[in-house]
Image (spheres, rainbow, N blue to C red):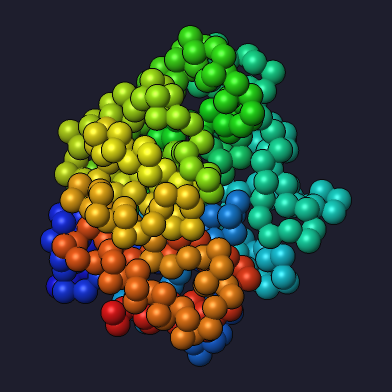
Amino acid sequence: MRSRERVLAALGHREPDRVPIDLSGHRSSGIAAIAYAKLRDYLGLPVKPIRVYDVIQQLAIVDEDVLDRFNVDTIELGRGFARDEDSWRPWTLPDGTPCFVPTWTNIERDGNRWVIRSGEGRVLAQMPDGTLYFEQTYYPLLEGNDDPQTVADTLDNCMWTAIASPPGPVDDTALAAGARQLRQDTDKAIIGLFGGNLFEIGNFLYRNDQFMMILAAEPKRAHRFLDKLVEIHLANLDKFLAAVGEHIDIILFGDDLGMQTGPIMSPAMYREFFKPRHKLLWNRAKELADVKVMLHCCGGVRELLGDLIEAGVDAINPVQISCAGMDAAELKAEFGADLTFWGGGCDTGNILPNGTAEEIAEHIKEQIRILKPGGGFVFQQVHNILANVPPQNVTAMLDAASSA
């Protein structure tokens, strides 16, 4: 099987010739740039520029030689863009490793920290010395000015929505052309990152505590905000899929709904505020293009999976197996007929950074034994490979996955 066939078979709940592998196919299956530089050196690969495409999470573009080395079957739509040197400028990672960042990212030195500014000069995010990632510092609706027009205007004034990774600031014509070319250049399954976050954008704009209080105490205000947000998302979805829909296989939405101990909200709250709107967005995507819908949703969300399936999700990521209720065997038995588990392949909290090569390989084999039967599984570690993970452990994980 070719890579795209392999991934689509798994999404269609048909067992492919081997388990498909995702590494850096989206912004929660990648590898920190610090760890990536060490991985290339460990593998003895030629020296190449380290390009940080997700500046907030400090994630590296994974080059073709590494994707080929580990039999990776996926690629992000953004890899078809920013291929020229003019799209990148020099920077330095927190450990001193030279790298490049997109030219359109407004990173500046400010005392003992790096900051990211808006077009108006406001500090949206910071990375103090001694830390490894950017953190949000500005919440545009914290003071409560959330009339519908304000919601639209403030989306570019928070960290997560203002900082674009490739394809970056391109128009619809360039977006369509780049997507078409990538489709011609690769046989990997192409993932188009859309986002369409609802709960999370409320957190990004109001701040987590404030938005949760609005959901609980001011439901009319919450519905008004979410209605405007869906209106914005639907308009953007129509434009996005008009440009790239025929060239991608999976469209990725996001909304982190879980914690280590279970869902952030009750199923009743999810059904009132988010399920109908998720259903509207996900069904619209499937009307516009022949795509599978994947939801990035961290944490323990077992109690919400039935509702997510009813709303139209095809695959869930990252399947955070260390959380309450997220036992892989139980999830496969209860939801495996209807849901593809895109993740859950390796525990990144303890086993990947701390285990021996043998312990990691045994863990991978067990996860694959549980999740592989009947398809409905794409191997990915639980979220990104962080900066502290030794390269030999990354290699042990991916070699075990490709040989299982």
Quarter of the image where one finds residue 396: bottom left
The furthest residue to the right: 111
Q: Considering the image in quadrants, where does the N terminus appear?
A: bottom left
Residue positioned 54% across, 19% down in the render:
216
Identify which residue, 297 or 80, lies in the foreground: 297
Could you say where residue 351 lies in the image, as x and y percent from the top left? 52, 72
Could you say where residue 325 lies in the image, as x and y percent from the top left? 42, 49
Q: Considering the image in quadrants, where does the C terminus appear?
A: bottom left
Quarter of the image where one finds residue 206: top right
Reply above or below: 45 against 167: below
Q: Is residue 107 visible in the rendered structure shown here?
A: yes
Residue positioned 72% across, 47% down in the render:
126
Q: Position of 4 compared to 154: left or right? A: left
Reply above or below: 400 against 124: below
Image mark count:
0
The furthest residue to the bottom: 44
Could you say where residue 261 lies in the image, as x and y percent from the top left? 53, 45
Could you say where residue 294 lies in the image, as x and y percent from the top left? 31, 47
Q: Is residue 46 visible in the rendered structure shown here?
A: no
Residue positioned 13% across, 61% down in the render:
14
Reply above or below: 232 against 324: above
